[in-house]
Each structure stands twice: as C-alpha cells, then as structure tokens.
Image: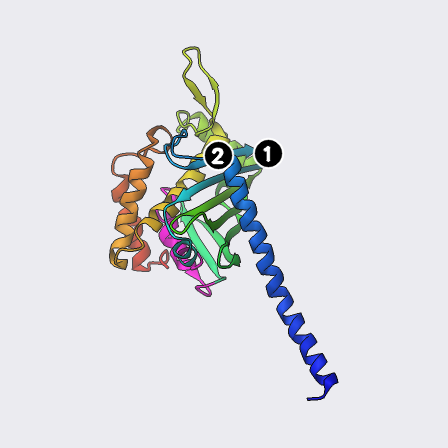
Amino acid sequence: MSRASWSAFAALLLLAAAPSAAIGAEAGSRAAALRERFAALDVDASGPFGLPLHLASKQGDGTLAGDVHARVEHRFETVREALRISARWCEIMILHPNVKGCRTSGPAHGGGNVEVRVGRAGHVVDFRFRIAAATDDYLDVRLEAPTGPAGTSDYRIRVEATPLDAQATLLHLAYSHGFGAQARLAMDAYFATFGRDKVGFTVVGRDAAGAPVHVRDLRGGLERNAMRYYLAIRAYLDVLALPRAQRLEQSLRKWIAYTQRWPRQLGEDEGHADVKRRDIARMQGGDGAGS
C-alpha cells in the first residue's frame, strides 16, 4: 500500500472510530451527571420512603412528569443486561395493575416495540423501544408512545442506570405523558368520584391537626404510576437469579410486598394478586397479548 493510500485508509479508520468514541464520552458524562444529581439529593434509607429513594413530580400546561432516583442492590451488569432486552419489559410492565397484557415485536436487543393493553377496555399503547446508550458504566433505555388511553398522548418512560459501587446501581426512572381537554375532563371526573380518596406521595401542606396533606388529582396519579413502574423494575431485578419459570410469580409477590409499604397510595383491592396471575397467564399463553 502506497503512503497516500495508507493515509487515506487511516483517515477512514479515524472517521469510523470517532462516532463510537464520541458516544462513549457522552455516556460517561451522563453517568457522572446522574451520580452527581443523586448525591445532591442526599438520599438514604432514613428518608420518608424508608428506602434510598427520591420521588419528584410536576404538572405543566398539558403535561405531567415524574422522576424516581433510587439505589438498588444489584450489580450494574445485571441491571444493564436485563433492561436492554425488550421482551423482559413485558415481564416488568405486566406487574402494573392497569396493564392487562403485553407483547413485543422486532429485534430483542436495541429496537422494536413493546405493546401493552391497559384498563378494562384494553386500550393499546404501542411503545417504541430503543437503547439510547449502553456502555460499561451507563445505560439509557427509552420507551415512547405517541398516544394513550382517554385522549392522553406522548407517553415516555426513560430508565437510566450507572454503578454506585461493585454491588449497587443507581436507577433513574423518568415517566411522563401529555393530556388534552378530553383527557383532562375524563381524569377530573375520575378523581371526583372513584378516585376521590387517592393521593400521591408529595407532601403539599399540613392539616389543622398537623398531619401531612399529600398531592392529589392528576399529579398524584402521575406519582402513583411512576412508583408502580419503578417498583415493577425493582421486583423484576430481585428475582433474576431464580429459574425462569418461577420469576413472574415471585416478582408479583415482591411487587405486592413493596406496594404494601404505602397502602394509602398503592393499596389494591383484595384479589388483586389473582387478577394479575390471570393477566400473566394470558400473556404467556400468547392469546394476542403475550410476548
């Protein structure tokens, strides 16, 4: 190979390597920023949740968003390999009480769709699944759906992870969606009737007796769902060491045990576990709702 040809070939190698290097550097920067953010929250098990966990939410003009930052006692490599596979998200999302079925399509790693059926009407929410980053110390997984039930829209679930030490991982769940006039009317009607006693986690004041007053209505609902998704991920990670045939039943038991810590926010009706077992059985049976 001539000197000119070799120079041209070397230049091509540098061009090919540059995007990968840039992605790695950006992921490293995001991992560092995530750890700094968690450190600034000063989260430990002595906080209001009794776990190293922080929840924040906000309501904007037609948008709801919530963030959960938490330490989980699982190796980062375990978390990364579990959450980067789209089919495993069905095993996570089916634990949510409003999810009645789930199936995936497309490649198992790095793409495809996660389609969930929600509510009694079985409204389909079709999430596009993608891995924005997956390196030795950072994971960024995103699920995005343009439409949801009752006029809601722009559903986004984002999970970031980075190691805190050799045995623990920092997990960040961001959950958000939009709502228009139709959705606002439907949700207002729900919170004025069936959901009138439901509250979120954020304390917004104190009553005359000094007891905490928790956020309600749309923002409270957003907080409950963000926590449900976070606890579903946590429960699933907790059972990965078990034989595959046992995982869903044991993850359901873990999820219920976690939610019982906050009965006012996350308590379910008696018989909820049996309902979820039927949902899981349908999903596994491949009746159009399975993976």
Location of residue 71 by image quarter? top left
Q: In the image, 230: left or right of 128?
A: left
- The residue at 32%/38% (across/down) is 258
Task: Pick the residue in front: 202 or 219.
Answer: 202
Q: Looking at the image, which residue sits at the far bottom? A: 1
Q: Residues within 10 Å of mark 2 (few under 14, many from 20)?
A: few
- Across and down, in percent, residue 173 comes to 48, 44
Residue interval drawn in magenta? 82-109
Give me the residue at 40% from left, 11% from top: 209
Residue at numbered disc 2: 42
**Identity of the amino acid at label 1?**
Gly
Where disc 1 sits, the SS reads loop
Q: Which quadrant of the figure contains the N terminus?
A: bottom right
**Up/down of 246 relative to 120, above or below:** below
Of badges 2 and 1, nearer the viewer stands: 2
Number of callouts in the render? 2
- x and y, in percent, of residue 166 in the image: 40, 52
Q: In this view, does 101 lie to the left or right of 13?
A: left
In the image, 162 versus 224, the foreground residue is 162
Along the line of sight, which residue is nearer the eye, 9 or 257? 9
Which quadrant of the rendered structure holds the C terminus?
Answer: bottom left
| Disc 2 from disc 1: Cα separation | 26 Å
Mark 1 highlights which residue? 60
Direction right: furthest residue: 4
Secondary structure of the residue carrying numbered label 2: loop
Q: How crowded is mark 1: few (under 14 residues within 10 Å), some or many (20 or more)?
A: few
